[in-house]
Image (spheres, grey):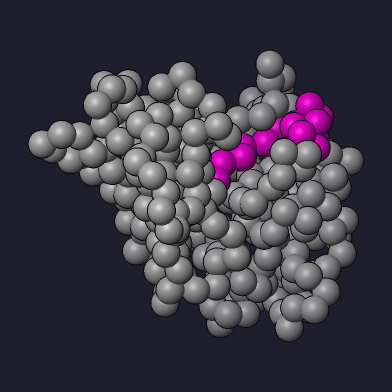
Amino acid sequence: MANLAPESSNAPIRVAVAGASGRMGRMLIEAIRDSGDCVLMGALDVPASLGIGSDATAFLGLASGVPITADIDQGLAGADVLIDFTRPEGTLAHLAACARLGVSAVVGTTGFTEAQKAEIAAHAQRIAMVMAPNMSVGVNVTLKLLDMAARALATGYDIEIIEAHHRHKVDAPSGTALKMGEVIAHALGRDLKECAVYAREGVTGERDPSSIGFASVRGGDIVGDHTVLFAGTGERIEITHKSASRTTYAQGSLRAVRFLRGRTAGMFDMFDVLGLN
């Protein structure tokens, strides 16, 4: 159960961004600058980043007075909340500092192990956190639709999840695809760990009707496409979400930031943020 603090004033929410030199980091920084109710307070990146020491909004031709730093404490100083879309190891280090400093967090990083997820859950006992594999409002509405579809199509339909991303993505299936699988499996009363099929090659035999299949495509600059296929006899239902820009992730992240205002502890997801639970 999350703890709620008294509502704060209408002062701007002070936000720090991890991975500030990357594509997503820059998108977040621009969204914060344009938001009207948030202000950039800190910018973090790895020590090897060429952006270290430069102004966080230099890529916009503007000066924010916020330098990009590899010093976690410096990057979080004065911040109310951190937005982190980096890598599991980096995110864990950032969250440990957030828990120590009392900084809330919005986490869009994917690829965590079960042990790492347990570590994050422990941090959420000390700080408020929104964690979701995809911050897009549209994706999370799609997840709700998938829950409804899976319950209605529980028998007689084979379920396959197909996702496509850019050539630089390092994990597969995507965190969003896995979340889709988890939502569907839960709706069907199954355990995804037991029914997921991640690869097919050679003579595989007939399809197990209780399985949920995954297929991953990597290439070009695809931001993120996800399709869930419910294949029955005589008909197919496809539920698809396609991202054309990372702007959707940035705007969803800011909705999560606003949701955390006044909350002091607890683990939340985008269903909580959007009122879909």
Q: Quadrant of residue 156?
A: top left
> What's the residue at 60%, 30% (across, down)?
268
Q: Nearer the viewer, residue 35 or 203?
A: 203
Residue, far left? 234
Q: Quadrant of residue 104?
A: top right
Q: Nearer the viewer, residue 69 or 201?
A: 201
The number of callouts visible is: 0
The vertical placement of 122 against 25, above or below, is above
Q: Quadrant of residue 160?
A: top left
**Residue 169 location (% of width, % of height):** 55, 66
Q: Is residue 175 visible?
A: yes
Residue 136 belongs to magenta span: yes
Q: Quadrant of the N terminus?
A: top right
Q: Nearer the viewer, residue 276 or 35?
A: 276
Instruction: Tell me the magenta residue range.
Output: 117-138
Q: Nearer the viewer, residue 118 or 270?
A: 118
**Residue 259 location (% of width, % of height):** 56, 34
**Residue 127 location (% of width, % of height):** 76, 33
> What's the residue at 71%, 19% (across, down)?
3
Q: Is residue 275 visible?
A: no
Residue 228 belongs to magenta span: no
Residue, far top? 1
> What's the residue at 70%, 76% (across, down)?
55
**Residue 7 location (% of width, % of height):** 64, 25
Q: Is residue 164 left or right of residue 145?
A: right
> What's the residue at 45%, 68% (across, down)?
218
